[in-house]
Image (spheres, rainbow, N blue to C red):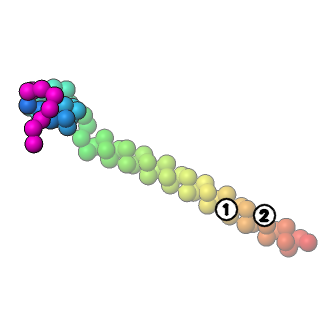
Amino acid sequence: MERSGGSSGTSWADQWDYSDQYGGGQASAEKKRGGGGWKSGMEKTKAAASTGFKKVKEGTTTGFHWIKEKYQKRTQN
C-alpha cells in the first residue's frame, strides 16, 4: 500500500501524535521534577474521602431527622 500526500515518511496517525518520542521536551522535564509523586496523590485521595464521608454523614442525619419527624406526626394524630 502506497502512502499518498508526500514523501515525509509519516503516516496520518503519526502526524497527529503529539507525544514526545525522543524523551525531551516539557513532559519529560515535569517527570524529572517529580511534582509531588504519590504524596500529592494521597493527599487528594484523603481530601476526596473526607468530603465523601461528610456528604454521607449529612445525608444520613437528614434522613434520620425526616424519619423522626414522620414518626412523630403519625403518633400525634
Q: Answer whether residue 20 is visible to the viewer in this image.
A: no
Q: Residue furthest right?
A: 77
72 is higher (above) or lower (below) than 22: below
Which quarter of the image is occupied by the C terminus? bottom right
**SS class of the residue under badge 2?**
helix
What is the C-alpha distance between the residues marked 1 and 2? 10 Å
Which quarter of the image is occupied by the N terminus? top left
Quarter holding residue 34: top left
Rendered location of residue 41, percent (x, y): 31, 44
* Three-letter code, disc 1: Gly
Near mark 2 (Cα within 10 A), the count class, few <14, some 14-19 or many ≥20, is: few
Quarter holding residue 44: top left
Q: Magenta part of the protein: which range?
A: 1-8
The numbered mark at residue 39 is none
Q: Residue at x 39, y 49 (%)?
A: 46
Viewer-nearest residue: 27 or 50? 27
Left or right position of 60 against 30: right
Q: Residue at x 71, y 61 (%)?
A: 65
The numbered mark at residue 63 is 1
Label 2: which residue?
A: 69
Q: Answer whether residue 52 is visible to the viewer in this image.
A: yes
Viewer-nearest residue: 31 or 39? 31
8 is higher (above) or lower (below) than 42: above
**SS class of the residue under badge 1?**
helix
Q: Residue at x 8, y 31 (%)?
A: 9
Q: Residue at x 54, y 52 (%)?
A: 54
The secondary structure making up most of the magenta span is loop
Among the two numbered marks 1 and 2 on one chain, the one whose residue lies closer to the N terminus: 1
Rendered location of residue 16, percent (x, y): 22, 32
